[in-house]
Image: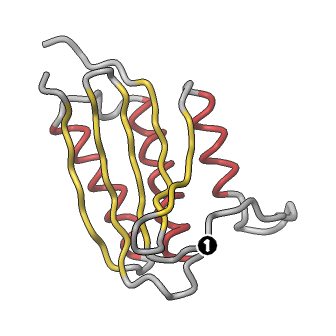
Amino acid sequence: MADHQEATVTLPSAPASVSDARRYVARVLAEWGLADGTEDADTVRLIVSELATNAVQHTLGQSPTFTVDVRLDREEQLRIGVTDSHPRHPRRLPAAVQQDNGRGMVIIRCLTAERGGRLSVTPTADGGKTVWICLPWTVPVR
């Protein structure tokens, strides 16, 4: 394997883009031969859905686009970042049992930690942020 593989897509900050982001990452995983259709790939798609949803819903319409970056490095770490131009970092919101939202960051944090990964937020040079996860990922031997 090369030092790393990377793929990036920029999408409009609109609800329909959440499923586009999920499909994009699924396609990248499949192209890289990273066990598409496995529980880990399904988990990554769920995490991407939550990250993209946050980029669309919680930037208060101030970020016209968001970017999804997928990277696999030679140390077998899969990193997925979602970048938007809004400076506010995601935060855990209180959610009542009957509410349909407010659990995205909890879901991301739990799924990432369950697989031995980490979740982080880093500011970008333009005043926005990247919310990213890094997961250990075994590359299949070919």
Please give the name of the residue rendered at 24% of the width and 16% of the height, measured from the top-left corner: 140
* Residue 101 relative to residue 25: left or right: right
Q: Is residue 28 left or right of residue 134?
A: left
| Percent x, y of residue 43 | 48, 39
29 versus 50 height, above or below: above
Q: Residue furthest front?
A: 125
The picture places residue 92, in percent across and down from the top left corner, at 75, 59
- Which residue reaches farthest right? 96
Q: Is residue 61 above or below residue 137?
A: below
Left or right: where 30 falls relative to 17: left
Report the colour scheme. Answer: secondary structure
Q: Which SS class for mark 1?
A: loop
Residue 110 sits above or below residue 55 on the image: above
Figure quadrant of the C terminus: top left
- Residue 87 location, x and y as percent? 55, 74
Residue lying farthest to the top in this orientation: 141
The structure residue drawn at horizontal position 27% and vertical position 30%, both measured from the top left corner, is 73
Nearer to me, 76 or 87: 87
Mark 1 lies on residue = 88
- Quadrant containing the N terminus is top left
Residue 101: quadrant of the picture: bottom right
Which amino acid type is shown beneath numbered disc 1?
Arg
Q: Nearer the viewer, residue 137 or 121?
A: 121
